[in-house]
Amino acid sequence: MQIIRGYKVRIYPNKSQQQTLVQTIGACRWVYNHFLEEKKRHYLENKKSLSYGATSKQLTALRKETDWLSDIQFQPLQQSLRNLDVSYGRFFRKQARFPQFKSKKDTRQSFRKVTGWKINNNKISVMNGVEVKFRGTFPDQPKGTLTISKTPTGKWHASTIAAIEIKQPKQYRKPIGIDLGITDLAITNKGKKYPNIHIGNTKKEQQGFSRKQKGSNRRAKVKVVLARKYEKIANRRSNHLHCISKTITSKNHAAIVVEDLAVKNMMSNHKLARSIANASWGEFLRQLKYKQEWRGGKFIVINRFFPSSKTCSKCHFIMQILPLSIREWMCPRCETKHDRDINAAKMLLQQAGELLGVETGDGRYGLRSMPRVTRSMKRGYARR
């Protein structure tokens, strides 16, 4: 099976190369902001959107008139125009908000190149006179564009995509159900629990940053320290999620069943918002999905309104009230003691079997099918 895989490596430009890359990023930002203003003005005057071809012609004429802009390679500036055109089109199709002006203070500073770059051993030739060393794995025959980015901590990265072949497993194991939690990130129907990582806070660094005078050198230094702390937290979290998702998908399950969680709605609970944000459920599910699909397995998502935690996995009796503080409960009908999370994972797996037409449970009681969700049900769910 052939897949498209992304690659990202750390690059180490020298001072002169860094100056060239920073100038290119600044020019791309200026072009983006300039033509965003032009698009707005043109639409207000003519009630028509300015096309990419028209902006590209204007950019060519602008480079001839502006000395500092003519020193910048044309292709990154052209890609900046394409990014603006895509953002503008997405706004009119009601797929995104209106494009915002870029700032020097943005956390991500980058530019892109489609052609004119190549790999020579352990170096990437970005443009003429800029051949930087890199560390990591990079494809010999890249298929996509090259993106050069700079982090708030001053680190430089290069990323691209390439097509690779992945072998499919000859035999698959039984499907597995996974419930997500805060103390334990993932709980399977077999009782396996993958703990969540406990990451330190940045309270001390935030206090030091807020107490420094704006525009001072000390504030700038503390800002870098704070950015490094955030970067370390993000790297630890990302590594933890990748390790767990790889461990689960490497067992070659025929299907992985999860629940469709309303993370934005759950974040409105201020007592759990920080813990939910640190758990990164959305990113974890994204990793599970593409890694499972790479191996040829199915990734099934169950409706969020299905009462997986309240339903007994043995006799399918539904508890009407089950507060979040109760982690273990006993079924009044069959007197089976349940762990809340493990029972939810079992019910998700059984519900997936019901949707796919597979017999589930012990056959004594029917499994409740997912109801059609109405507006009144959604309003009632939001009030709980």
Image (cartoon, rainbow, N blue to C red):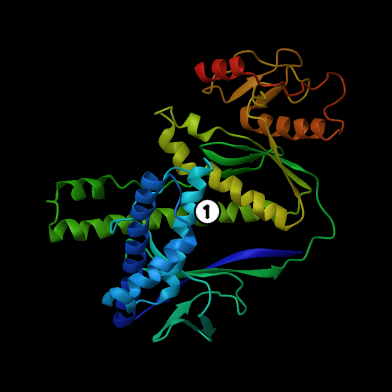
User: Residue at the location (77% across, 66% down)?
Assistant: 167
The quadrant the N terminus occupies is bottom right
Can the viewer see residue 35 in this picture? Answer: yes
Q: Position of residue 371 (x, y in %)?
A: 72, 21
Q: Quadrant of residue 262?
A: top right
Q: Secondary structure at mark 1?
A: helix
Can the viewer see residue 148 in this picture? Answer: no
Residue type at tag 1: His
* Front position in the image: 246 or 259: 259
Q: Quadrant of residue 223?
A: bottom left
- Left or right, 305 with respect to 316, comes to left
Outermost residue toward the front in this view? 46
Q: Is residue 76 above or below residue 240?
A: below
| Residue at which label 1 appears | 240
Q: Is residue 301 above or below residue 313?
A: below
* Front position in the image: 344 or 357: 357
Q: Position of residue 299 (x, y in %)?
A: 71, 45
Q: Is residue 27 above or below residue 318?
A: below
* Front position in the image: 345 or 300: 300
User: Residue at the location (41% across, 69% down)?
Assistant: 77
User: Residue at the location (76% across, 54% down)?
Assistant: 252
- Left or right, 88 with respect to 216, comes to right
Q: Position of residue 209 (x, y in %)?
A: 20, 50
Q: Is residue 182 above or below residue 194?
A: above
How many marks the image carries: the answer is 1
Q: Position of residue 306 (x, y in %)?
A: 67, 25
Q: Quick one: label 1, few (<14), some, or many (20+) residues within 10 Å?
A: some
